[in-house]
Image (cartoon, rainbow, N blue to C red):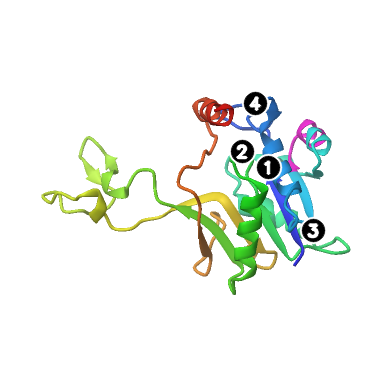
Amino acid sequence: MKITAMIPARSGSKGLPDKNIKKLCGRPLMDYAIKAAKGCKKIDRVFLNSDSHDYLRLGVKLGAEEFYRHERLAQDDVSMKEVLVDFISAMKLCEEPPDAIIVLYPTYPLRTSEDLTDIIEVFGDLSEDSLIGVKEPDTHPYLCYKNCNKWTPVLNPNPDKYYRRQLYPDYLEISHWACIFSTKAIYTLNAQLMCSDTFSYMIPNKVVDIDTLEDFEYAEYLMRK
């Protein structure tokens, strides 16, 4: 099976501007995804997908191939599915197109080549065409409310019953820490890159996903420690 890694790194991050190239322990954030993919023997090619020519030039220096994303696909309201349809359409024109795509968001710097090998091996053993990461939610839905003024719960637990944590019903949270699918499956997936037949892959609960400066500083603390 030929597997291509696609690392999405648009330049318009709002929460933490230019986070994809911000240096974490002396290395651009996206370098961690590139090196993890390059170090995985089950991945044939590694592409940086970006609307920024500066990002792409840096990505090439770090070892990735470049794929230019048109600026219309780098807007806040564009789904990753749209980005991937564009990418896969181009990959199908290659002499040896990939059988599957693994999407590696740069915001997970602690993900390793060994992690990717494990994910791909699980995917290879499946009959399903897509796999996405899941984890136990950081905050259980029983503790979440839509409107604190009216105290409207997200779910419908009995307000007069005390629930011990161990008795909470099982719920899972989607995580794009892990996301892999066959090239033919992308058209069946929704904007979250999943469908009813998508296989779930349990990822480590303590995963750092960088979206804010505080996340960035926490990741740096863990890595230096």
Q: Earlier in the sequence, mark 1 or mark 3?
A: 1
Looking at the image, which residue is at 71% across and 36% down?
Answer: 31
Residue 189 visible at all = no
Q: Secondary structure at mark 1?
A: helix
User: Quick check: is 76 in the magenta stretch?
Assistant: no
Distance Cα–Cα, label 4 vs label 2: 11 Å
The range drawn in magenta is 49-57
The mark found on residue 25 in the picture is 4
Amino acid type, mark 2: Pro
Q: Name the residue that disc number 3 marks.
A: 91
Q: Earlier in the sequence, mark 4 or mark 3?
A: 4
Distance Cα–Cα, label 4 vs label 3: 33 Å
Name the quarter where the N terminus is drawn.
bottom right
Amino acid type, mark 3: Met
The location of residue 99, given as percent across then percent down, is 74, 66
Q: Nearer the viewer, mark 4 or mark 3?
A: 4
> As rendered, which of 217 and 148 lies closer to the eye?
217
Looking at the image, which residue is at 84% across and 61% down?
Answer: 93
Q: Name the residue that disc number 2 marks.
A: 109
Name the quarter where the C terminus is drawn.
top right
Q: Earlier in the sequence, mark 4 or mark 2?
A: 4
Distance Cα–Cα, label 1 vs label 3: 20 Å
Q: Secondary structure at mark 4?
A: loop
Q: Name the residue that disc number 1 marks.
A: 33
Mark 1: give few (<14), some (14-19) or many (20+) Cα within 10 Å.
many
Q: Secondary structure at mark 2?
A: loop
Looking at the image, which residue is at 35% across and 43% down?
Answer: 139
| Circle 1/circle 3 CB separation < 8 Å | no
Q: Nearer the viewer, mark 2 or mark 3?
A: 2
